[in-house]
Image (tube, rainbow, N blue to C red):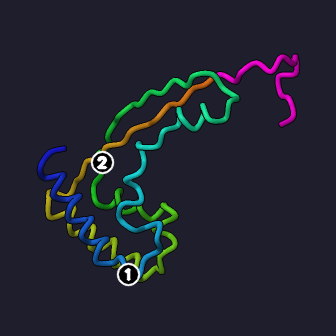
Amino acid sequence: MPRDQREVFDEIAEIYDRARPTYPERLQPGVLSSYGKRRYDEEIAATGAFGTAFLAGYPFHREYDADVYLDLLRTQSNHRMVEERERERLLADIRLAIEARGGRMRVDYRTELVLARRQSTGSSDPHPEV
């Protein structure tokens, strides 16, 4: 991640930290950091119902200007749960952080694919009752 992008993310993390006492737990920093660390292959194997899982990750990024990024945040349920006046104050601070660094920011994403074939049950019914 380019240095200026790291700086805007660090500043946005500080903005969330300052707002933390009044925000729902799901908005707290660190909650989203668990994404990408979950072991889906182990969870699938533990069911005993599937063969070996295939996992693949597909990274991509998107650049946002401040308006589009804030509109995106407004659609996320963890932000919608916050009282409107508090949410708009948070978003105004995030806007200032983005605009102070050129008005655009890059967000890196990763789509995870997990594919596993159901083990044969010996039944000809493709949808046996569970």
Q: Secondary structure at mark 2?
A: strand
Q: Amino acid at mark 2?
A: Val
Tell me the magenta residue range. Answer: 117-130
Q: Is residue 3 magenta?
A: no
Do the numbered discs 2 and 1 sit on residues whose CB atoms are within 8 Å?
Answer: no
The quarter of the image holding the N terminus is top left
Q: Quadrant of residue 53?
A: top right
Q: Residues within 10 Å of mark 1 (few under 14, many from 20)?
A: few
The quarter of the image holding the C terminus is top right
Residue 81, image x, y percentages: 52, 73
Q: Amino acid at mark 1?
A: Pro
**Residue 80 relative to residue 12: left or right:** right
Q: Is residue 124 magenta?
A: yes
Q: Who's the residue at 24% across and 69% down the image?
A: 14
Q: Secondary structure at mark 1?
A: helix
**Residue 107 circle label:** 2
**Residue 21 circle label:** 1
Of mark 2 and mark 1, the one earlier in the sequence is: 1
- Our reading of the magenta stretch's main secondary structure is loop
Measure the alpha-carbon separation of dots 2 and 1.
Answer: 26 Å
Residue 100 position (above or below residue 33): below
Q: Who's the residue at 30% across and 51% down the image?
A: 64
Q: Quadrant of residue 93?
A: bottom left
Residue 68, image x, y percentages: 35, 56
Residue 52, image x, y percentages: 57, 22
